[in-house]
Amino acid sequence: MDYSALESDFECACDDVIKNLGNQYKTGYQSGGLGMLEAFFDLIKSEFDKAAQLFIQSNNISENPDALKLIHTIAKKHAKKCVEFYGRVV
């Protein structure tokens, strides 16, 4: 299996999630204060978890532990970056 292609494809999927989260933040969370920020952090985790699961299913890699580890690591990395970024915005 070509893990570099898999990684590149999932990075693109994560970029889409990041763009979507940015739009959601602007329209529903930006002016909500700390309570809304916590809800947005939960949304970030949920969106990256969903993206990972969808990617795993659509690429038929649920039985490949190395691929699963790679996808989950990338998802966590992007989720952490988003939480850090939006945590500074407030």
Image: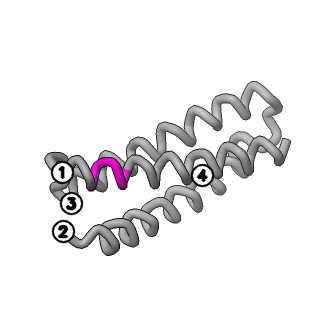
Q: Amino acid at mark 2?
A: Met
> Which circle marks residue 64 in the picture?
1
Measure the alpha-carbon separation of dots 3 and 2.
11 Å
Image position of 60 (left or right of 76): left
Which quarter of the rendering shows the C terminus? top right
Image position of 58 (left or right of 45): left
Specify which label sits upstream in the sequence, 2 or 1.
2
Marks 1, 4: nearer the viewer: 1
**Residue 29 belongs to magenta span:** no
Please report the bounds of the magenta region as a residue range.
67-71
- Check disc 2: other Cα within 10 Å, few if <14, some if 14-19, many if 20+: few
Residue drawn 29% across the image and 68% down it: 3
Q: Amino acid at mark 1?
A: Asn
Residue drawn 36% across the image and 69% down it: 9
Measure the alpha-carbon separation of dots 3 and 1.
11 Å
- The single residue placed furthest to the top in the displayed view is 35
Measure the alpha-carbon separation of dots 3 and 4.
23 Å
- Check disc 1: other Cα within 10 Å, few if <14, some if 14-19, many if 20+: few
Q: Secondary structure at mark 1?
A: loop
Image position of 25 (left or right of 45): right
**Residue 68 belongs to magenta span:** yes
Specify which label sits upstream in the sequence, 3 or 1.
3
Q: Secondary structure at mark 2?
A: loop
The residue at which mark 3 appears reads as 59
The residue at which mark 4 appears reads as 21
Query: Where does the image place residue 35, in percent across and percent down from the top left?
Result: 75, 25
Query: Where does the image place residue 34, in percent across and percent down from the top left?
Result: 80, 29
The residue at which mark 2 appears reads as 1
